[in-house]
Amino acid sequence: GQNIDQPTEMTATEGAIVQINCTYQTSGFNGLFWYQQHAGEAPTFLSYNVLDGLEEKGRFSSFLSRSKGYSYLLLKELQMKDSASYLCAVKDSNYQLIWGAGTKLIIKP
Amino acid sequence: DGGITQSPKYLFRKEGQNVTLSCEQNLNHDAMYWYRQDPGQGLRLIYYSQIVNDFQKGDIAEGYSVSREKKESFPLTVTSAQKNPTAFYLCASSISEGTGGYEQYFGPGTRLTVT
């Protein structure tokens, strides 16, 4: 079966750095997405990786290793507004998105 | 302003009643999707459509139905056959299905409660 694993919950301090990991086992791979979802709201797109390596976008960076079936989202200079769930999703061989359950990130002052 | 709208935000229904959730987009996207989100689980695909008058079942289509008569609209009907309909329903759209890093844009969601 297809599977995406993320930690259920993480806690970090305002101003610090946090890394949210995602491992996947899917039938084929056509890219990996990270989304942010605040409680009760819609997910919003953060990043897309299809080749190995690091993609940097402001305070957020995303890394991909296809050989290891692994990605991480790195958030720097954490702000209180970064408290949200972070969803990892992989596009499989049928171009369907397979979603992880999400990681709830709690930021403490 | 381009975007996706879903209405209503909260919906309450009695068991045994069908209910239709609306989804409209003005992004000129070809592909549209319906997901269900339950606590502690990833988004699960109910139905998707790549083009007008065509749609495909997702992983959990049983007890649901859709139509795609217009490019902008993709309503979802939750029928009485759906065993556990209480959930947060999200509609999304993207430029196209298939290759490319085309992200999905989501509507604000409808929280359906069936008692």
Image: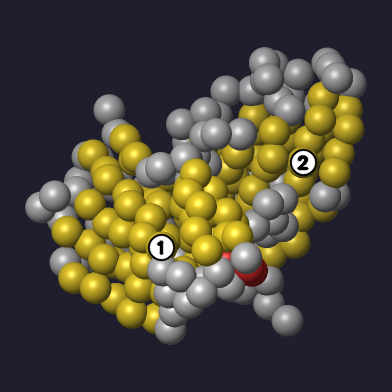
Q: Position of residue B112 (x, y in %)?
A: 78, 35
In front: B54, or B61? B61
As drawn, A31 above or below A60: above
Q: Is residue B23 visible?
A: no
The quarter of the displayed image where residue B10 is located = top right
Report the mark closest to the observer, 1 or 2: 1
Q: Is residue B15 left or right of residue A27?
A: right
As drawn, B37 above or below A49: above
In front: A82, or B104? A82
* Quadrant of the snapshot with the N terminus of chain B: bottom right
- Badge 2: residue crowd in 10 Å (few <14, some 14–19, many ≥20): many
Residue in view at x 64 percent, y 48 percent: B90
The answer to whether marks 1 and 2 sit on the same chain is: no
Q: Which residue is farthest left? A: A67
What residue is pinned by disc 1?
A18
The quarter of the displayed image where residue B27 is located = bottom right
Given the image, what chain letter belongs to the residue carrying mark 2? B
* Quadrant of the snapshot with the C terminus of chain B: top right
Q: Is residue A39 left or right of residue A31?
A: right
Q: Secondary structure beneath disc 2?
A: strand
Residue in view at x 32 percent, y 68 percent: A62
Residue type at mark 1: give it.
Val
Given the image, what chain letter belongs to the residue carrying mark 1? A
Q: Spatial distance from mark 1 to mark 2, Cα to Cα? A: 31 Å
In front: A18, or B76? A18
- Badge 1: residue crowd in 10 Å (few <14, some 14–19, many ≥20): some
What residue is pinned by disc 2?
B111
The quarter of the displayed image where residue B35 is located = top right
Residue type at mark 2: give it.
Arg
Q: Secondary structure beneath disc 1?
A: strand
Residue in view at x 63 percent, y 51 percent: B91
